[in-house]
Image: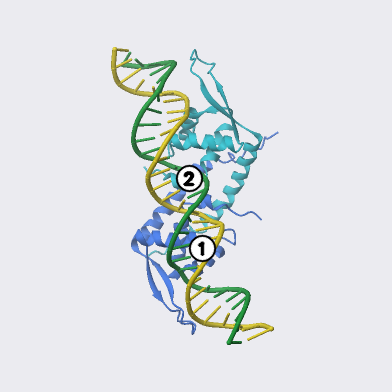
Chain colours: A cyan, B blue, C yellow, D green
DNA sequence: ATATTTACTACGACAGACGTAGTACGACAG
DNA sequence: CTGTCGTACTACGTCTGTCGTAGTAAATAT
């Protein structure tokens, strides 16, 4: 099965992460798994890409981190959770609008759909 | 009007250029204008981005260059024309298939479509 | 006891985009 | 004939995001 070269995705990692965070705070490992699930296994984000995205987005004010221990188990290991900020929501929505435009532009350069006559 | 940040496009510059070249050989300035036209003015490729893409794609064997003077006018100024190679056509088609996958993946992270209930 | 999974951090290399600048030719205005 | 504008590039350097490699450390499974 085909996988997607991540360079194509470049510019949408932040959007993917923010999408996951719109359904509640999460942390690195879980977000990574959610991205794999949501993309039906077609895309797996690299660890370093993920964590550098966290750093960048926190710096930009799109997410905020807090250290916490998971309450659902007796696990006492601390994790760094992230939650999306208001600026993050706005950025995500802006990215969604931009996606509509981008998709439209790129599709003008893709096959033209009804080009059957390749003899 | 909204314009698209080029970083989103990254990974599709080559595809756009190759699309233009599928309808015949062309050169820098003309390709630049064609990209602006095809995208309905929504995307303008930067000169340096364009020419560095030429260099990269020629190195990769996707395009070939030849110096020629335009025959439609009395202009004797020489231009560097590019035409797409067989490898270029295959690469373009591969990119088109990849686009379908990429679009599908990213759309899983966009708005979820029918999310009307944002109270 | 040891291996694996989870949960990170640090460092550095690389590629593509692009800002700035410069060259050079032709056309056209003043 | 001189300057400006449009055309047609080249060179150089910076920046950003991605990702390979490596290391640490706690929790969990074997």
**Crowd band around label 1 with a 10 angstrom C-alpha radius: few (<14), some (14–19), many (20+):** few
Which mark, residue B47? 1
CA separation in Å, label 2 and label 1: 23 Å
Viewer-proximal residue among D9 and B11: D9
User: Is residue B72 positioned above or below C4 on the image?
Assistant: below
Location of the N terminus of chain A (image quadrant): top left
Q: Position of residue D15 (x, y in %)?
A: 52, 48
Q: Position of residue C16 (x, y in %)?
A: 45, 53
Pick the front one: A60 or B58: A60
Locate the C terminus of chain A and report the quarter of the image it occupies.
Answer: bottom left
The chain to which mark 1 is attached is B
Mark yes or no: residue A27 visible.
yes
Left or right: where B92 falls relative to B108: left
Q: In this view, does A71 lie above or below D13?
A: above
In the image, what residue occupies the spot 46% across and 61% down?
Answer: B17
Q: In which quarter of the image is residue A91?
A: top right
Q: Which of B95 and C5 is in front in this view?
A: C5
Seen in the picture, residue A77 relative to B119 is either above or below; the reply is above
Q: Residue A116 carries which label?
A: none
Position of B80 with respect to A87 (left or right) is left
Q: Residue at x 43, y 79 (%)?
A: B69
Q: Where in the figure is residue D18, as x and y percent of width and height?
A: 45, 42
Secondary structure at badge 1 equals helix
- Helix, strand or loop for disc 2: helix
Which residue is pictured at 46% across the width and 38% down the height? Answer: A49
Badge 2: residue crowd in 10 Å (few <14, some 14–19, many ≥20): many
User: Can the viewer see residue B115 in this picture?
Assistant: no
Circle 2 chain: A
Residue identified by numbered label 2: A9
């Amino acid at each position: 099965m085909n996988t997607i070269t991540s360079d194509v995705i470049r510019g949408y990692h932040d959007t993917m992460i923010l999408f996951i965070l719109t359904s509640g705070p999460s942390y690195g490992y879980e977000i990574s798994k959610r991205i794999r699930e949501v993309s039906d296994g077609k895309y797996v984000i690299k660890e370093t890409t993920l964590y550098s995205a966290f750093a960048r987005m926190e710096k930009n004010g799109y997410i905020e981190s807090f250290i916490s221990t998971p309450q659902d188990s007796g696990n006492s290991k601390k994790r760094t959770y992230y939650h999306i900020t208001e600026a993050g929501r706005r950025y995500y929505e802006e990215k969604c609008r931009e996606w509509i435009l981008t998709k439209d532009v790129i599709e003008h350069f893709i096959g033209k759909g009804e080009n059957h006559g390749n003899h």
